[in-house]
Image (spheres, helix red, strand yellow):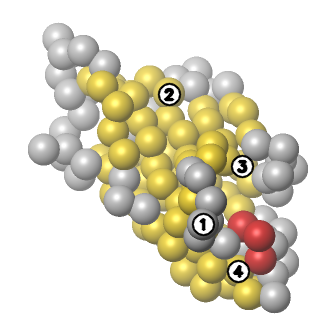
Amino acid sequence: QVQLVESGGGLVQAGGSLRLSCAPSGSIFSTNAMAWYRQAPGKQRELAASITSVGTTNYADSVKDRFTTSRDNAKNTVYLQMNSLKPEDTAVYYCNAVAKRTRYSSDREYWGQGTQVTVSS
């Protein structure tokens, strides 16, 4: 069973930076769209950033100009560089990907287990 594994979360002071990474735990043939969602305590999960297979990106207004997502298609890995972090960025960050296990399989959606990002004021 393939899962997405996030890393890079932690505790940082306001104004600081963190870089999240997400990679599959097993073999993946190819990935289509990849994205980062986040869920703050007591709030719904929301899309923070997404990136298509050709590198087109989209960001939530709340993170625009501070966060940058990128990907390495050879490794089926997605990254989220977070700069100028604010206390309101505190949340569990989840990786999401639409991917094919093999050349002949259908696209399916995968989620990571989440990584905690805490920004202190």
Residue flagged by tag 4: what amino acid is it?
A: Val
Residue flagged by tag 1: what amino acid is it?
A: Gly
Q: Determine whether, in the image, residue 104 is placed left or right of residue 113.
A: left
- Compare marks 1 and 4 and give the one earlier in the sequence: 1
Q: CA distance from mark 2 to mark 1?
A: 27 Å
Q: CA distance from mark 4 to mark 2?
A: 28 Å
- Compare marks 3 and 1 and give the one earlier in the sequence: 1
Residue at point 77% right, 77% down? Answer: 87
Q: CA distance from mark 3 to mark 1?
A: 25 Å
Neighbours of disc 2 within 10 Å: few (<14), some (14-19), many (20+): some
Image coords of residue 110 (percent x, y): 33, 39
Total labels drawn: 4
Instruction: Name the residue furthest left.
Output: 1
Q: Which residue is mark 3?
A: 68
Residue flagged by tag 2: what amino acid is it?
A: Ala
Tell which tag, 4 or 3, sits nearer the viewer. Answer: 4
Q: CA distance from mark 4 to mark 3?
A: 18 Å
Q: Which residue is mark 4?
A: 119
- Compare marks 4 and 3 and give the one earlier in the sequence: 3
Look at the numbered disc 1 and give the secondary structure of its residue: loop
Q: Determine whether, in the image, residue 47 is placed left or right of residue 26.
A: right
Neighbours of disc 4 within 10 Å: few (<14), some (14-19), many (20+): many
Quarter where residue 15 is shown:
bottom right
Residue at point 59% right, 53% down? Answer: 44
Q: Which residue is mark 1?
A: 42
Image coords of residue 16 (percent x, y): 77, 78
**Image quarter of the C terminus:** bottom right
Give me the disc on residue 33.
2
Q: CA distance from mark 2 to mark 3?
A: 15 Å
Tell which tag, 3 or 1, sits nearer the viewer. Answer: 1
